[in-house]
Amino acid sequence: MESRNINLKHFKAKAAKKKKKYNTFLKGIHSRNNGKEINKMAVAFDKEAFQKIDCLSCGNCCKTMTPTFTTADIKRISKHLNLTVAAFTDKYLERDKKDWVNKQQPCQFLGSDNKCSIYEIRPVDCAGFPHTHKNNPGFVGASSVNRDFFWRCPIVYHVVDSIFDKVVNQK
């Protein structure tokens, strides 16, 4: 299956139409008795989505969200950029409650080609994004995160849309 490019404007319009319905679904997902089954579906739909969707044609995650930077991320990236930890955090990061996050959006490391200039050493949060494939806490356990992401990320949208069809519409 070949990757396909994302028309971000079209995607945003499509996601906006289903935002309320999918938010309601994800808010109530904990009350379902088939949580383990839903988590397994999410892993399968995540793989399917990555086969169908070319992230580099989108980059909306890096344009509209920020990862959290762990202490290890900060040390690794600072070293790579030949900056001290203090210089790196002063230049690029700010505190959001207890987490370090980007000062700006889009991400300062996002190129005009939607490629990450620090891809090989990117934050762990970025490397695992969009997290729909993870078993802990699982898709059901991360439903509040998925509510924030499905209308921003075509991969998450595909997973939520597919699970909704399978669970609610019995397809």
Image (cartoon, rainbow, N blue to C red):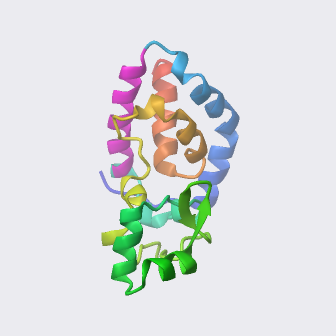
On screen, 65 above or below 32? below
Regarding residue 166, the answer to whether it shows in the image is yes
Q: Nearer the viewer, residue 161 or 10?
A: 161
Q: Nearer the viewer, residue 120 or 90?
A: 90
Residue displayed at 56% across by 54% down:
98
Q: Nearer the viewer, residue 72 or 68?
A: 72
37 sits to left or right of 163 = left
Magenta span contains residue 47: yes
* x and y, in percent, of residue 11 in the image: 59, 52
On screen, 70 above or below 116? above
On screen, 1 above or below 90? above
Question: What secondary structure do most residues of the magenta stretch adopt?
Answer: helix
Residue interval drawn in magenta = 34-50
* x and y, in percent, of residue 41 in the image: 37, 29
Residue displayed at 57% across by 36% down:
144
119 sits to left or right of 69 = left
- How many marks the image carries: the answer is 0
81 sits to left or right of 167 = left
On screen, 27 above or below 9? above
